[in-house]
Image (tube, rainbow, N blue to C red):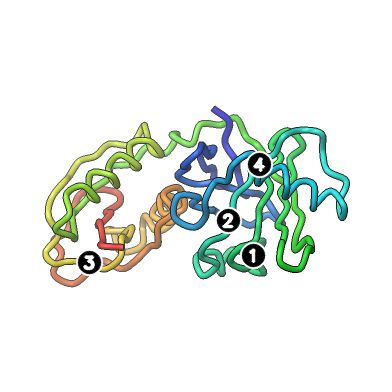
């Protein structure tokens, strides 16, 4: 399955509701969780957006994928998407390796960058993962475990317990105190989550990475 890669990290290719899409722009890793930060739009809207963008830019002959930015705050730390605003349209051209941000309310192209496709499997992360439910919602927790299984197929779930308290946000934690910081960041990127410190009161784990389900 094709994967998009940005820099040294590899992300799974998006589907209709994707875990994450990675882009290589200027050598910095960025990720867009389309199921949390954007929506995949229909073919008619895609056709209309392509027609408008083609007035300003010579587009490839292939059919792109269209997504809409719905929460720019979740993209603010990602350099390529920093100028994006809610409502902006993003065109992904996989074969031609181009990504375009278009702002329909002013009919202007915001950014254009290269999209690099890598055939490497994102499941090459071999990690022991602990999950803890920081909510009273077992369905949300099960959904997170399903996302982990999909994004990290070669990793091992070694713990599934209840957190000591409720958490407002789902976080990825390095339980080793820094040794696995890069691994925790990579897992967070793949899942479209944020990293955090080991919460006070949570017991230690022998896992490489701890993920706590939050109510967000």
State yes or no: discs 3 and 1 in contact (Cβ < 8 Å): no
Q: Residue at x 45, y 51 (%)?
A: 186
2 vs 3, front mark: 3
Residue 215 rendering spot, x and y as whole percentages: 25, 62
> In the rendered structure, which disc, 3 or 1, sits on the residue that comes first in sequence?
1
Q: Would you name the residue on which mark 4 appears?
A: 44
Labelled disc at residue 101: none
The percent position of residue 162, horizontal first and vertical second, equals 12, 55
Q: Taking 111 as reference, is 176 left or right?
A: left
Other-residue count near label 4 (Cα within 10 Å), few / some / many at <14 / 14–19 / ≥20: few
Which quadrant of the figure has residue 195? bottom left
Contact, mark 1 vs mark 2 (Cβ under 8 Å): yes
Q: Is residue 11 left or right of residue 214?
A: right
Q: Please give the name of the residue rendered at 55% of the width and 46% of the height, measured from the top-left corner.
A: 40
Q: Looking at the picture, does residue 120 appear above or below residue 160?
A: above
Judging by the rendered image, the residue that carries numbered circle 3 is 167
Report the side of 73 relative to 193 (left or right).
Answer: right
Q: Do residues under tags 1 and 4 come within 8 Å of each other at their CB atoms?
A: no
**Closer to the N terminus: mark 2 or mark 3?**
2
Residue at label 2? 30
Q: Earlier in the sequence, mark 1 or mark 2?
A: 2
- The residue singled out by tag 1 in the image is 79
Task: For marks 2 and 4, give the one nearer the viewer.
Answer: 4
Circle nearer the N terminus (4, 3): 4
- SS of the residue at dot 3? loop
């Amino acid at each position: 399955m094709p994967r998009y890669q940005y820099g040294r990290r590899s992300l799974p290719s998006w589907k209709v509701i994707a875990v994450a899409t990675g882009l290589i722009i200027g050598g910095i890793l960025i990720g867009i969780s389309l199921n949390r930060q954007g929506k995949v739009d229909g073919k008619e809207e895609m056709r209309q957006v392509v027609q408008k963008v083609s007035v300003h830019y010579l587009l490839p002959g292939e059919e792109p994928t269209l997504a809409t930015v719905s929460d720019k705050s979740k993209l603010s730390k990602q350099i390529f998407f920093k100028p994006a605003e809610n409502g902006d349209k993003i065109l992904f051209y996989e074969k031609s390796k181009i990504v375009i941000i278009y702002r329909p309310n002013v009919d202007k192209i915001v950014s254009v960058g290269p999209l690099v496709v890598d055939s490497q499997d994102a499941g090459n992360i071999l990690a022991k993962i602990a999950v803890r439910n920081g909510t009273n919602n077992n369905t949300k927790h099960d959904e997170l475990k399903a996302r982990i299984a999909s994004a990290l197929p070669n990793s091992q779930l070694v713990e599934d317990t209840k957190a000591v308290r409720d958490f407002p946000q789902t976080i990825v934690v390095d339980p080793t105190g820094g040794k696995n910081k890069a691994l925790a960041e990579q897992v967070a990127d793949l899942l479209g989550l944020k990293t955090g410190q080991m919460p006070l009161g949570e017991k230690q784990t022998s896992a490489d990475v701890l993920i706590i389900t939050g109510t967000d």
